Amino acid sequence: AQSVTQPDIHITVSEGASLELRCNYSYGATPYLFWYVQSPGQGLQLLLKYFSGDTLVQGIKGFEAEFKRSQSSFNLRKPSVHWSDAAEYFCAVGATGGFKTIFGAGTRLFVKA
Amino acid sequence: GAGVSQSPSNKVTEKGKDVELRCDPISGHTALYWYRQSLGQGLEFLIYFQGNSAPDKSGLPSDRFSAERTGGSVSTLTIQRTQQEDSAVYLCASRMEGTSAGEQYFGPGTRLTVT
């Protein structure tokens, strides 16, 4: 069965520090992978997506993610975090050719000054 | 507007009452999803509409939940005889035809509180 695991419920980083949010997935074939961000009181916004090709993908707001098939991971990274990045981040896997997307439970990011 | 809109933004209701939640997708988006987001949980898929096809209702948690989409645009999620466990944020998302399942545009959600 398809599943997405985000091992960290919450993470706190200092402003200006680097960030890595972990995501592991279980899927029978090559998945479509996504990261979304949800600011307080808002819906989810797509940060980036991976379909195929280059395993390092760039997204909006300075985020990037790397697909590692051997580790079934799709970790999200940012070199320097800004206070406005404080939000909840969701990793998701989508079936190729299907309509469903499975979301992880989310990681809440706190940014301290 | 250019985005997905949902109304109301907040709804407080008494246990046992019926509620209707509305979603206006992005114009031209043929796919529409409803999700439920409970505190500290991920997104729970509820129902999916695609064009004029029969909706996929496999995520609806009970027969108290139903949804319709009129004219391929606006959708209404109805919860009958609400229970306290129905308290959650209900999110709607739409997607353009031809894009992958994960490329969804989300509305801001309706926060439902059942007292």
Image (spheres, rainbow, N blue to C red):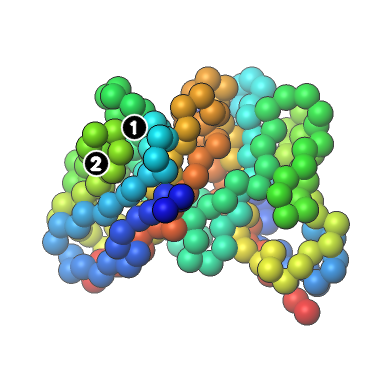
Residue A41 vs residue A92: left or right? left
Looking at the rendered structure, which numbered label has been put on residue B49? 1
The kind of secondary structure element at disc 2 is strand
* Residue depicted at 30% across the width and 29% down the height: B55
Visible in this render: residue B58? Answer: no
Percent from the top left, x then y, of residue A63? 76, 51
Chain that bears disc 1: B
Percent from the top left, x then y, of residue B62? 24, 43
Quarter placement of the C terminus of chain B: bottom left
Tag 1 near tag 2, CB within 8 Å:
yes
Of residue B41 and residue A17, the one placed in the foreground of this image is A17
A45 to B51, vertically: above or below: below
Residue farthest toward the bottom in the current orientation of the protein: A113
Residue A24 vs residue B98: left or right? right
Percent from the top left, x then y, of residue A2? 55, 31
Visible in this render: residue B30? Answer: yes
Residue behind mark 2: B67
Q: Are marks 1 and 2 on the same chain?
A: yes
* Residue depicted at 49% across the width and 45% down the height: B105
